[in-house]
Image (cartoon, rainbow, N blue to C red):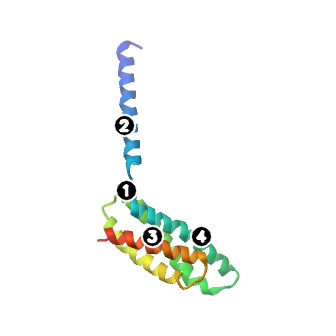
Amino acid sequence: MNRRQVLSGVGFLAVAAGTAEQGRSQTSAGVPNKAVVAASSDCVNKGEACLAHCLELLGTGDKSMAACSKTVNEMLAVCAAMRSLAAQGAPSLGKFAAVCLDVCKRCETECRKHVHSQCKDCATACAACQVECKKIAA
């Protein structure tokens, strides 16, 4: 290897390291739409606990949780997508926020019909997500 090859290799590594560092600082410096990412993440977390509880009760024959499990399941899919789209700053975010708002309203309404702490927590998370979705809904 001659001196020119070594210097060009070192230069390449320096540029690559700088590009990687720049990518990390942009990612850690701030997530786009941070509030809606957090709210939709909380919905997913609380919704998973609620759905697990619904399924447990359904397994014992308690059919009163059927509607709750369906709305929570839909909310989980929509909020997971919302979290991803918001983190990316997707162009369709405003339109999707309107869908997420509607789904979270229905989930909150259904979860509030039940006395279980998992349902109450899910309803509260859905209410908070609605607040954030309203801010960006088109």
Which amino acid type corresponds to the residue marked 4 in the rendered image?
Answer: Ala
Report x, y in % for residue 131.
Answer: 38, 72
> Circle 4 — which element?
helix
Marked residue nearer the N-terminal end (4 or 1): 4
Q: In this picture, is 64 found above or below 41?
A: below
- Looking at this view, is 117 or 1 the one in front? 117
Which amino acid type corresponds to the residue marked 3 in the rendered image?
Answer: Val
Q: Which residue is mark 2?
A: 19
- Looking at this view, is 60 or 8 the one in front? 60
Question: Could you give the CA–CA distance between mark 2 and mark 1, rounded to whole angstroms?
Answer: 19 Å
Report x, y in % for residue 34.
Answer: 39, 59
Q: Which residue is mark 3?
A: 78
> Circle 1 — which element?
helix
Question: Could you give the CA–CA distance between mark 3 and mark 2, rounded to whole angstroms?
Answer: 34 Å
Q: Which residue is mark 4?
A: 49
- Report the quarter where the N terminus lies: top left
- Report the quarter where the C terminus lies: bottom left
**Labels 3 and 2 touching (C-beta < 8 A):** no
Q: In this picture, is 86 found above or below 3?
A: below
**Labels 2 and 1 touching (C-beta < 8 A):** no
Q: Which residue is mark 1?
A: 88
Which amino acid type corresponds to the residue marked 1 in the rendered image?
Answer: Gln
Q: Is residue 76 left or right of residue 13?
A: right
Kindly report which numbered mark, 4 or 1, lies closer to the viewer in this rendering.
Answer: 4
Question: Could you give the CA–CA distance between mark 1 and mark 3, rounded to whole angstroms?
Answer: 15 Å
Report x, y in % for residue 103.
Answer: 43, 77
